[in-house]
Image (tube, rainbow, N blue to C red):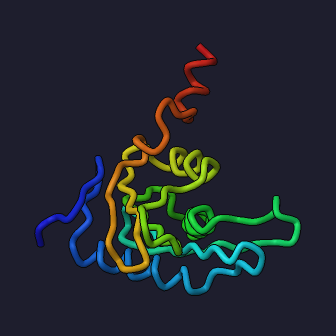
Amino acid sequence: MESASSTKNKKITDDQLKELIDKAMGMREKAYCPYSKFRVGAALLTHNNRFYTGCNVENASYGLTVCAERVAIYSAVAGGDTEISAMAVCCDIKGKFQGPCGACRQVLVEFGEDMTFFCVKPDGTYQEMVVRDLMPMAFTPSSLAEAAD
């Protein structure tokens, strides 16, 4: 099958992209957001062709809220997968493509600056980008190594 998108190490097929977007849209429906009412769903695909999902989970103590992107990534790590090929995120904003918050951008960089990232609107349309473009001049694991030299 022809590639819909690719990362440095892994190609994602059209079928995988459709499933990734469908899963992100479905997870948006499961969000627990009684305070903001702002639903977000995320899905990722690992190099091992496994899908992991997440939704935002709010808390009355707002600082304890966890974003959908981080829930999906932490689920992948708990499942033994740290090599992520692509992620799709869908939120309730209809009029524009919405990127992740700064904390999620930093976590995304940790798992791959070359990861393909899809911002998805509720109607299923999407914008494709690369994580490095979401977080220019990012603090990365290699930054720690450079500081030690």
Of residue 59 and residue 140, the one placed in the foreground of this image is 59
Q: Residue at x 82, y 59 (%)?
A: 63
- Looking at the image, the residue that sits furthest to the right is 61
Is 135 left or right of 32, judged from the image as shown? left
Is 8 left or right of 37, judged from the image as shown? left
Counting from the top left corner in percent of width and height, residue 68 is at: 60, 68
**Placement of the N terminus among the 4 image quadrants:** bottom left
**Placement of the C terminus among the 4 image quadrants:** top right
Of residue 116 and residue 28, the one placed in the foreground of this image is 28
**Numbered-mark total:** 0
Q: Residue at x 20, y 65 (%)?
A: 4
Is 107 left or right of 25, judged from the image as shown? right
- Looking at the image, the residue that sits furthest to the top is 149
Q: Is residue 90 above or below residue 98?
A: below
Counting from the top left corner in percent of width and height, residue 46 is at: 41, 64
Q: Residue at x 54, y 56 (%)?
A: 100
Counting from the top left corner in percent of width and height, residue 66 is at: 71, 65
Q: Is residue 114 above or below residue 11?
A: above
Q: Residue at x 56, y 68 (%)?
A: 72
Counting from the top left corner in percent of width and height, residue 108 is at: 52, 51
- Residue 50 occupies which quadrant of the picture? bottom left
- Looking at the image, the residue that sits furthest to the left is 2
